[in-house]
Amino acid sequence: MDGKRLLDQVRDKIRAKHYSIRTEEAYLHWMKRFILFHRKRHPRDLGAKEVEAFLSHLAVARKVSASTQNQAKSALLFLYKEVLQVDLPWLADIVSAKRPTRLPVVLTQSEVAELLAHTSGTSGLILRMVYGTGMRIMECMRLRVKDIDFERAEITIREGKGFKDRMTMLPKSVVRPLQEHLGRVRLLHEQDLRDGHGEVFMPYALARKYPNAGRSWIWVAHARPCARDIRTSMCSTVRFSVGKDFARPAFIAHGAPSRR
């Protein structure tokens, strides 16, 4: 491992611990920023003073939120403890930024209905699934066809937050749109296979155990155009790519009330 670049060592350690791909991307981002902030000095040559200077820069100069600052701190703690294996007493003494306590903004049923009326297509289906099932957005993105039970009106969520499985209901209002969506996605997947795409990354060495599993119809969501997996460089169209602001057009059209 000593011959590898530092960030490659970070990737290996993160994947050995089965952290999510989003965590990997976030941690690598903050580590790169930390190194560039200190003019590309190796983190092994830096200490508490430099870490605190970087975190202070984020809060004062970049004006990031407390949660963002704490995410950067977590990335640096992972770098020193898990990758560099440097057991330094100052690591535990770095104070985390205090997040403000706020009440959540909750829309009424009529406001939600009016908001959903301004959505359509795959994004609209995702919003209805999230609202009706209680799934998180990424749980909806990772939903497998086999985990939907139309007969029992149930959805099995695999490896949710904390890598825990759970069951949730399947609302009647999304059954027909979801079935129609699955019919379209299946045709797209079959076309992707004919075009040489449609394969997905299989974790935990399942690709060796089941060589053809990655090409089977697994996922509810579908990506257009081809999305490249950063772990394998595989070009895949079996995931629908969505950002946190995918519902923004509906909020703008609806004129959602501000309650802050």
Image (cartoon, rainbow, N blue to C red):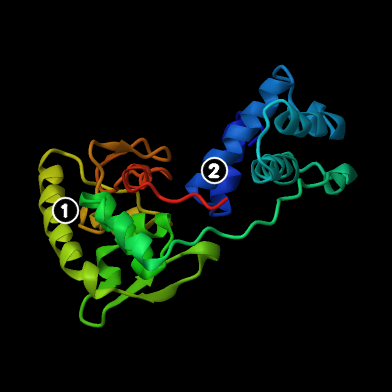
Is 40 drawn above or below residue 193 in the view shown?
above
Q: Which of the two residues, 137 or 15, is positioned nearer the viewer here?
A: 137
Q: For this rendering, which residue is in front, 112 or 92?
A: 112
Task: Please tell me whether residue 73 is drawn above or below residue 118 in the rendered image.
Answer: above
Give amino acid for label 1: Val
Q: Quadrant of the N terminus?
A: top right
Q: Residue at x 56, y 40 (%)?
A: 26
Q: Secondary structure at mark 2?
A: helix
Residue 221 seen in the figure = no
The percent coordinates of residue 107 (x first, y second) are 44, 61
Amino acid type of disc 2? Glu
Q: Is residue 213 visible?
A: yes
Position of 54 compared to 102: left or right?
A: right
Q: Nearer the viewer, residue 159 or 213?
A: 159
Q: Residues within 10 Å of mark 2 (few under 14, many from 20)?
A: some
Which quadrant of the figure has residue 31? top right
Which numbered disc, 1 or 2, marks the residue closer to the eye?
1
User: Taking 7 as reference, is 138 left or right?
Assistant: left
Mark 1 or mark 2, earlier in chain: 2
Q: Which mark is residue 48?
A: none
- The percent position of residue 131, horizontal first and vertical second, equals 37, 64
Please give the name of the residue rendered at 41% of the width and 43% of the height, measured from the top-left corner.
Answer: 245
Residue that label 2 marks: 24
Q: Residue at x 16, y 39 (%)?
A: 196
Circle 1 is placed at which residue position?
Answer: 185
